Image: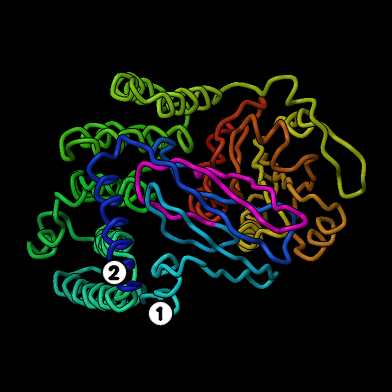
Amino acid sequence: MRKKFKSYYAATMLLIFQIAAAMPSIALPTHIYGYYKGGPNSIWLSYWLISSARSSTYLKGSVDPATRAFEFHIELKYPTFLQMENHAFVVIPGDTVKVDIVYSEDGSKFEFRDQRHGRDFFDGMLKEFKPFPFDKYVFESQAELLRYKHAVKQRYDSTLSFVERYFKSGDDGIAAVARNFLKVRYYDDLLYALTMGKLSRKELPIQYVHELDPAFFENESLFGFREFILLLSNYNRYINLPPGSRYNGYDSATIAPIIKSAHSNINGKAKDHLLLFIFSHVSEIGSTENGSQMAEMYKQLVPVFADDSTTTNYIEECYNLFRKLGSTLPSEILTQQLKTLQGSTVTVQQILSSDKVVYIDVWASWCGPCIAEMEVEKKLIAELKGVDVKFVLISVDENFGKWKSSVTSIKIAGQHYILKDGIESPLIKYLSFREIPRYLIFDRNGQLVSRDAPRPGKVLKDKSILLDHLE
């Protein structure tokens, strides 16, 4: 009876997955619930939505103080990864996930009470396979490129074998998602060589390019994975653009061919979502020079998604955010107060009123990537000493003491401030971002140049990103 039930359950879930893939325009309710033992009275869940192109959706759930129970109800059109407590697992539309979480500062432990295998296959794979040694390859010849292809193909075959072992008694629907996701990673590895190499399209070995199946890039069932949309973008940029064409959000000359190729090389809904991704990406990292390209994409996207209010609202949001570039912040933002290391207060307007280009680093003491980037930022500050560029580091920490101690420990120059209300402050909400580190650029007149500027490492290599605004 148990075996019969398991077979029926697996077949039912596979059918749900197939329905979701066949009719991706239908969103199905998905339920995540369980118990959060030993942790705080709130828990965050995040996932990526194709309708928001580049941004993750963050949901804050309450944990019952007495029972420690929590639950989330979301709607999904496509299989995707959910993330809680830095733990990622696969869900399919219409799924129900039962999970117990034991909190630990070193990393919370998850136990899926429905005993369906494969939800955390990605974590299992990361434990079994070491990082691929990309730095061993230089991609300067056909022979080197084919040697690299052979190595990544072997790795891909090994991960596929791992998935087959992992799912031998598990969920067929999620197993199918896992296989496709591994193929996304494999294709991304193949494209990586083309981004780093020196061979033109004509010089590429024909067997290398033929490994990439064009039909796979139109697989709508993978729209729930940000990695797939990034792969789609890379495929469009590096396979279908002229040799040597590089995508740079600050270079409007490269945007036009990218937009054009998005409509000539990819078909179906993948074409529309690729253009949405490009539009969203440029709205984040672009400059006022991209105004005409943004207007062109906006006109193309609005009618395509006219029946999808969530996506059209996101398109409007992106366009409105982009149009904030080249203007000063509104008075209610300029008057927002920040604290100095000494405990005194300053306003945003005082920070920007210096007749200098201002490069702002938004960070927190608990953010590892933020602090890691500061080692390069120290070099950048030293090399631009005496130039009219002001470096401002704004923390979104909630604890003044921890922030002050961290600044003392890091020993990085620049002007340091802590932002009241942190990531929920009016300044952050106006600029509309939740991930850190985040870098901002304002010109001499206090006008917003970029709300997602390059990291210090890139600026160190190309200081014109800052210096051009001194003119």
Closer-to-camera residue (433/244): 433
Q: Is residue 84 magenta?
A: no
- The percent coordinates of residue 436 (x first, y second) are 61, 50
Inter-mark Cα distance, 1 to 2? 38 Å
Q: Are marks 1 and 2 in contact (CB under 8 Å)?
A: no
As drawn, is 232 to the left or to the right of 314?
left
Q: Look at the image and tell me in which quarter the C terminus lies.
A: top right
Q: Disc 1 residue type?
A: Lys
How many residues crowd mark 1 within 10 Å: few (<14), some (14–19), many (20+)?
few
- The percent coordinates of residue 185 (x first, y second) are 31, 62
Residue 238 lies, with reference to residue 162, above or below; the image says above
Q: Is residue 193 visible?
A: no
Q: Disc 2 residue type?
A: Lys
| Front label number (1 vs 2) | 2
Closer-to-camera residue (387/26): 26
Q: Is residue 70 magenta?
A: yes
Q: Earlier in the sequence, mark 1 or mark 2?
A: 2
Segment colored magenta: 56-83
* Mark 1 residue element: loop
Judging by the rendered image, the residue that carries numbered circle 2 is 4
Asked where in the image residue 160 lies, by quadrant, the reply is bottom left
- The percent coordinates of residue 1 (x first, y second) are 32, 72
Judging by the rendered image, the residue that carries numbered circle 1 is 130
Which residue is located at x 36 percent, y 38 percent? 277
Which residue is located at x 28 percent, y 31 percent? 256
Q: Is residue 317 visible?
A: yes
Q: Main secondary structure of the magenta part?
A: strand
Q: Residue farthest to the front?
A: 1
Asked where in the image residue 460 lies, by quadrant, the reply is bottom right
